[in-house]
Every structure is written in C-alpha cells, then in structure tokens.
Amino acid sequence: MENYKKSILKKFYLVASFMTLLLFSIVFRVVNIQYFQGEKYRQISKDLTQKPFTIYANKGNVYASDGNLLATSMSKYDIRMDVMSVDPKIFSRDVKALSKELSKFLGKSTQYYENKLRKARKFKNRYLLITKNIGYNDYVKMKQFPIFRLGVYKGGFIAEQKTVRAHPIGKIAERTIGYHDQRGDAGIEGAYADEMTGVDGSRLKQKIGKGQWKPINNVNEQEPIDGFDVITTIDVNIQDITHHALLRQLEYFEADHGCAVVMDTETGEVKAISNLGRTKEGKYYEKRNYAVWESHEPGSTFKLASLMAALEDKVIDTATVVDTEKGRIYIHGRKVEDSDRNGYGKISAARVFEVSSNVGIVKIIRKHYDHQPEKFIEHLENFGMTQKIGLPIKGEGKPIVPSPKNRKTWYGTSLEWMAWGYGVSVTPMQTLMLFNAVANDGVMVKPRFIKEIRKDNIVKKRFYKEVVNSRVTSEETIKKLKKVMENTVIRGTADNIYSPNFSMAGKTGTAKKYVSRHVNEKGDTIPAGYSNKRYVASFAGFFPVEKPKYSCIVVIHDPNKKKGYYGATVAAPVFKEIAQKIYTSTPVEREFVTEKFNSEVIAENYKVYENTITSDDNKMPNLKGMPAMDAISLLENFGVKVKVRGVGKVKKQSIRRGTPIKKGMTIILSLS
C-alpha cells in the first residue's frame, strides 16, 4: 500500500513539474512576444491588414506649338460603398433618397439601386461597386449624395482614384505623340518619359476581407508630384491638313500604309507627321511611325543625291547631254529601263532628272564613278544618308548603303543600282532631311519634334535648331537643283500637280518592292525578287520655290495597281493638297486661289469658299459644314481672331450669320 502511494505521488510530482514548466514556458513566450518581439509581431499584423498603395503621378501634358493640348492625364474614379459602416437608422431613412440620386446620375431605375443596396446590407458587403471611370466633376457631385455626404466612416463612401491618358484631338498623330506604359516606349512620350513621369505618391488602405482593400483616410500619405509638360513643334492646323490628305489617298488607292511629314525649312521643326496603316477591315489608324521607323528602297527620289554628287564634282552640268538610247540598257546582264518604253533619246542632265530617266542617271553615275565608287559613297555620307539621324523617338530605322569597303555587300551593279534608288534603304525622314537641305540653301538641319520642356509654365529646357551640316553642297549646285526640281513640277513627271498660283518643287519616286521567297495562296513557291505587283510611290519637295517655307515628303506603300502606282499619280497629289491648304489657310494678304481640281469633293469645297469670301465683306458668313481650315482662312482674312474647339467641319459658330464683323473680334468655332 505504501509503495502504491509513493507511486501515485511520484506521478503527481512529474505531472506537476511538467505543468509548472509548461506554465513558465507560456509565461516566457507571452513576455517575449509582448515585450521583446512585440514590435515585430505588431508590424506583421499591420502588414497583413494595412498597406500603402501607389498613387501614380500625372504625366506631364503634351502640347502643340500653338498651345493646343495633344495628350494629358485625366483623373478617373471608381466609386464603391461600405454599406456596413452606415448607421442602421440612417441607412433605413436615406436609402431611397440615395437610390433616387443614383438613378438620375447613372441611368437605371430607383428600385434597381435600392434593391442593390439593401441586398449588399443583407450580405454585409463592405466593398460594393457603384460605378467606374467617372470624371472629377462627377466624383464631386456624388460625394454630396444622401448618405455619401457623411464620408468614409459614417457614409461608407469609397472613391478610388486612377489616371488615364487622353488625346483631345483623337487619333491624329497618335503614334508620334506616343506612350510610356506596359506596351513599352513610343513616340514623344516614350522619348521624354523621365521628364514627363513625375514622382508617385501613396495612400494607406485597410484589408476588409476577400482580398479587398479600402482607404483608411480621405487624404494621401504622400502626394504625387506631376511630371513636366512637353511643348512640341506640331501645328494642329497643318497636322489636320496632312492627316486627312494622306487618309483620303490611302482609302482611294486601297494602299497598305503610308506616311506624310511637313517640316519647317529653316528650323527643322516637324509641323505635321501622319503615319497610317490599314486594318483587315480596310480602316486606317496610326499603326507604326513609318516616317521614322521604316527603312526602304526609295526609288527615284534618291536621284537627287546622285545628281547632287555629279554636279558638285563638276563632272557634269545641267546642260550635259546624255544618250538615254531607247529607254533600255543592260549592265552585267541586268536590265535598266525607263517608264517610257520608247526612250527619251539624247537629252540634258537636267531633263534626265525632270523626266526621271533611269537609264540617264545610271549612265551619268557609271561613267564618272565606276572607277572611284568610294567618292560617290563619300558624298552620300556628307548628305546624311549612311547613318541614323539620331532622333529622340525610339525605333529609328537604320539606313543600308553598300560600300566597296565591304565586299560581302558590294556587287558589280551596286553603284549603278544605287544611282536610281535600288539596293539602298533609307527612312522617309532621311530623304526629307536631304530635300530640306536643298530648300534651305545647302544647310542641313536635324528634324526636331520638341520646342520646350516646362513646369508650371516655367521653361526648364529649350530646344534649338541643330545644324547637321552647314554646307552639304555649293551654292551654285543648290541653285541648279532648285531649278530642275521646280521644272519637274512644271514640265516633268509631276506636271499633273502644277499650279500657276503657287510654286512647288520636288521629285517623284516609284520603286518596285523586293519580296523575299515565299509560298503564295495557291501553294506555289515564289522565288525572291522585285515584284511587278507591289510598289512604293513617293514624292518629296518644298514650297514655295522662291522662299521655301516648308519641305514635305509623302510615301505610300502597296497601292492598288489597277488604280495607279506611280509617284506622280499616288503621292504627288497629297503633296499638292497639303501645300495648297497651307497656302490658303495662312495667306499673306486677302486672296483666294482659283484652281482646276481633279477631285469633285475638293472642287465643291472651294466653290463654297469662293462664294463665301466674295459675298459680303462686312457681315458674318454662314460657316456651318465648311472644313475647319477653310473657315479659319476666311475669318482671318476678315481680320478677326479665331478659336477652334475640336476637329473636322464647322458645327457651330459663336457669331450668327449676318452679324456685322469688326476687326480684332474673337470668333469661336465648334467642330464636329
């Protein structure tokens, strides 16, 4: 019995000892957690239930040169409601009033919103979605609705702010304006992302279950700092002219894609740039920045470089006679032929350029540079054709110019093929830069997209004209080139765009596209080579000839061959329309252009313009339905100031028809 008691006591002591140790262990852990590691675990708990959310700073705005807004960040709000934070009596009393306001504001019935709110209350929903993507003004209005006006804690009003990028002028120049987001960096916004991005802020939110978070306070922990504004060289009026002129031609010729660029001759400021690609449905949009990105064989526009080199070396003069024979020659078994199959016979070097004789230009370059091709390549280097321009916009195409120094890319016909724009690839911007140098009396300036970077209307950085080459060729050569380019429009391949009312100079280009080896729709393997169905039509030049103000290039790829494919037919009319519209929208004095038009639509527009401007000089005309550029031109001729809202045709005018017009008054036009 005694032994049995001892045994029980022994077990009791063991259990008691274990319980004592366990108690001490628990006490130690509690003390350790509470005092020694308390801060750590409190932080873990806080991290699990609270965390800061980034408030992204507004990117800086992008402006046109005249102050028109091209891109901006807009605040958008998602509105939610924590129905459980509302006092039951207040909810019961005001739920109908809130539902009525939501109905007026969002469109659905009062009963719909009342049922939605009561159901959310029943299921204890603390994050009920009310609406998404509303603007700031609508957000302010909703804050004053019944119940919501009580705020976050008593009214359950949750507003989540975000920023979206908007382009006020729509899709025009969208690719050049660009973006800096999950898609990457493109255009101006991509090039100047560091300056435009700003500094992000933060806002503390609390977890309310089911992976949902709501703001703890109505104020931000750290306010975001907006980015810098960028002032571009783009002129909205010229951009509108260029975009629509290119678009109409692409649609008519059912082309794959195209681009058009207008540049200020003296400064290199790009006043307009349009890049349009075709969708499967036949619509056009800013698909890629073809003017900057696409390096391609230019065809006959490259003959300017060939003629410039020969004139500068004085191996020929514009009067030098060249025998183009019957419009066809063979070099190492490869054929060079003119578009006129009967040939041009013996003509001057100037005429070779004007009629775009392939045989003539090849003969000139072959005769004088076949024994010294390096000298010809040196000229191309001096003309800026062998290297990238170095534009800030990312994705600039790399030119391809063969050199005798690289035997892998140099063939027996390389020199001759380069002479007429084959076997060499350059971007439209490079070609334009060369043509602009001729217009600018031999001074080559770098194309420029940006004028200033600002913050709160204070200029932080100003961009100036950048001279690439102060003298690409002699003054004598420039004078000769200007004359033959003018004659190309008067009596050469571009005589279809000639106008006695305003002068233009330039060069047409038509190039067959090189197509790699492929399998066609029928399953046949087609070897690589130049296609007889696919072409690149182009025109580059400047205007007016006497004092060139603008240079311009138009390049159109894969027009419908049945409708036309020559540069004179496809691209040159776009150049003319751009030049003509710029003339009429910025006249030196009060005048209008009388012109023969191939387009019935354009002819009708100018009949309206002519009738309006000659009607009554002292009274306000009816501008409704008139293209914006024509309306602006007309009003500025009256000596008034014009403000434009939107793009397209005139929808509304601030001064009624028949109202006496006084010089200096301001007229506002609302466009469709």
Image (cartoon, grey):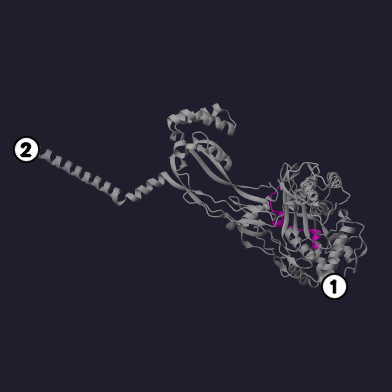
Asked whether residue 357 appears in the rendered view, the answer is: no
Q: Tell me which segment is drawn in magenta.
A: 285-302
Q: Is residue 144 above or below residue 301?
A: above
Q: Which residue is mark 1?
A: 315
Quick one: which residue is furthest to the top in this view? 111
Query: Hey, what amino acid is under mark 2?
Result: Glu
Measured as percent of width and height from the top left, residue 46 is found at 39, 46
Is the residue marked by circle 1 packed among few (<14), some (14-19), or many (20+) residues within 10 Å?
A: some
- Residue assigned mark 2: 2
- Horizontal relation, residue 572 to residue 116: left or right: right
Q: Nearer the viewer, residue 77 or 423?
A: 77
Sequence-wise, the earlier of marks 1 and 2 is 2
Q: How far apart, in angstroms, are the residues tagged by discs 1 and 2?
A: 134 Å
Q: Residue at x 71, y 67 (%)?
A: 467
Amino acid type assigned to the residue bearing label 1 in the image: Val
Q: Position of residue 489 (x, y in %)?
A: 87, 58
